[in-house]
Image (cartoon, rainbow, N blue to C red):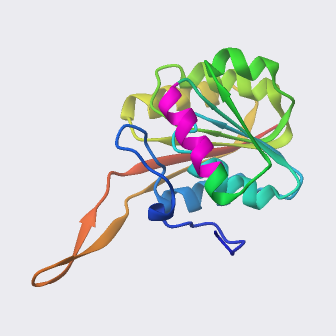
């Protein structure tokens, strides 16, 4: 299906539905790089949506494992379809509230947090207790309010090397007269290392 080690699987290769979000290809590539994944790692993908981050992470960690969590049954089903499509065996999918499910998980080497929930700060606090020392957290944010709350939580937490990157991607689209560039919504990516 995807015969490369580099991240950046094109969005159109994934199974998609209108009501389940996907982290777009270029943003996903940056998020994967910020996690600094290695073979054998255990990774959480909280708010997995379509499972695109889970798929990319599973390829990177090879013998490791990815745990994908979402409270939306549509997202869970779509993630399962994508896992099957890519033929990956190292991803577990968990349906439920991340704040409850995180408590039951083994320690992680890296954590991805997506979505726009108002509980992102609480999830970060729970994850810092499950993240190994030196582990990485990567948070994809589209709402200004979420950005503000995440920065407040990180300021009081056990993370350092906090990096904030905002990306705005434009993609080409053919028209009857030529090619135009269409801008996508900006995404802020916050990454940090657990002390």
Foreground of the two, 158 or 167: 167
What residue is at 57 percent from the left and 60 percent from the top? Answer: 30
Compared across the picture, whether 120 is left or right of 106 comes to left
Which quadrant is the N terminus positioned in? bottom right
The stretch in magenta equals 72-83
Question: Which residue is drawn at the image coordinates 78% and 18% (left, top)?
Answer: 103
- State the residue in front, 142 or 19: 19
Could you tell me which quadrant the C terminus lies in? top right
Q: Does residue 156 show up?
A: no
Does 4 sit above or below residue 184?
Answer: below
Q: Where's residue 165, x and y in %?
A: 51, 53
| Residue at left offset 46%, top offset 48% | 22
Establish if 178 lies above or below 120: below
Measured as percent of width and height from the top left, residue 20 is found at: 43, 39
Residue with the most extreme left position: 177
Given residues 193 and 104, the one toward you in this image is 104
Asked if the magenta segment contains residue 77, the reply would be yes
């Amino acid at each position: 299906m995807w015969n490369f080690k580099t991240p950046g699987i094109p969005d159109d290769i994934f199974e998609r539905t209108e009501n389940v979000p996907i982290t777009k290809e270029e943003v996903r590539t940056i998020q994967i790089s910020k996690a600094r994944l290695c073979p054998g790692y255990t990774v959480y993908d909280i708010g997995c949506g379509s499972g695109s981050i889970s798929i990319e992470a599973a390829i990177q960690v090879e013998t490791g494992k990815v745990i994908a969590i979402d409270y939306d049954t549509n997202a869970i089903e779509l993630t399962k379809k994508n896992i099957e499509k890519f033929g990956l065996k190292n991803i577990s999918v968990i349906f439920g509230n991340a704040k409850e499910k995180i408590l039951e998980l083994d320690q992680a080497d890296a954590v991805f947090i997506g979505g726009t929930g108002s509980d992102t700060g609480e999830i970060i606090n729970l994850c810092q207790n499950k993240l190994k020392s030196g582990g990485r957290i990567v948070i994809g944010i589209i709402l200004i309010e979420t950005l503000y709350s995440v920065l407040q939580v990180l300021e009081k937490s056990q993370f350092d090397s906090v990096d904030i990157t905002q990306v705005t991607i434009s993609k080409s689209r053919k028209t009857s007269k030529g090619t135009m560039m269409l801008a996508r919504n900006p995404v802020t990516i916050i990454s940090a290392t657990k002390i």
